[in-house]
Amino acid sequence: MNYQKYAKSLRALGATAALLMASACGDSGTESSNIVDAEDLIAANLYVEGKEGVWGDIVYGKADAPVTIVEYASLTCPHCANFSKNTFPKVKEEFINTGKVRFIYRNYVMNGADMVASAVARCRDMETAKRLMKVYFSRQREWASAEDLNGALASLARRTANMSRTEFDSCASNRGLMASLTEMTKNGREQFRVVATPTIFVDGVSVDDFQWENLKAVIEKAQN
């Protein structure tokens, strides 16, 4: 893949981001019969030390937590933004912060706007990635429908992470990060049958209904 040429095309794709959002999520959730090997799932995209940026899993919680949740999500998916805003904080408070759950986030890139936002969010360290992912989800409608996609994303990155426009532009065209995100998406699709976002696995079993009450019940059952 010619990443240099691809990077140049991303800004043009930004103009259609609002239209892409309408179909980006696919079905809201995957079939509940989707069961994968939990060890293979967890090991699929481990963080690679020594590389610039976060090239693998974005991880919340303790490594020895008894339950592991893996989420594949797109930054341009409204369902994913809703999960990030309304459900994830409850999971974090009740299960992650108490050592009961390790939560692994993986990008499932749907379009050019998604690629830019994902690469920029991952361009520094783990904590910056978490902050930018949260902001990009919470302000999704604002930047995804902006006439100047990169300008809107850069403004949020500056306010959230003190990221200069020069650094932003470098991150938005980082071929290594784009290759990593492309591979992460491909791996999710081919190895774990991810076809829609968000796809959420609890100990290797996909959850069809990822609203809080149902997800809470699934997590509590997995603890037993």
Image (tube, rainbow, N blue to C red):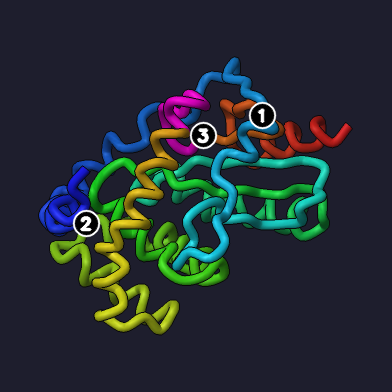
Helix, strand or loop for disc 1? loop
Residue where numbered disc 3 is placed: 199
Residue 204's disc is 1
Are circles 1 and 2 on residues that touch, CB within 8 Å? Answer: no
Quarter of the image for residue 136 reads bottom left
x then y, percent, for residue 92: 69, 56
Which image quarter holds the N terminus? top left
Lower position in the chain sequence, tag 3 or tag 2: 2
Frontmost residue, 118 versus 52? 52
- In the picture provided, is 224 more to the left or to the right than 56? right
Give the residue type at disc 1.
Answer: Gly
The residue located at (62%, 23%) in the rendering is 36
Label 3 crowd (10 A; few <14 / some 14-19 / many >=20): many
The residue shown at (48%, 23%) is 193
Write down the residue under mark 2: 145
Does dot 2 land on a helix, a strand or a loop?
Answer: loop
- State how far apart marks 1 and 3 are (Cα): 11 Å
At label 3, the amino acid type is: Thr
Residue depicted at 76% across the width and 60% down the height? 97
Q: Give the range drawn in magenta.
A: 188-198
Q: In this rendering, does residue 87 appear at all?
A: no
Residue 20, x across and y down, in percent = 23, 42
Quadrant for residue 118, please give it. bottom left
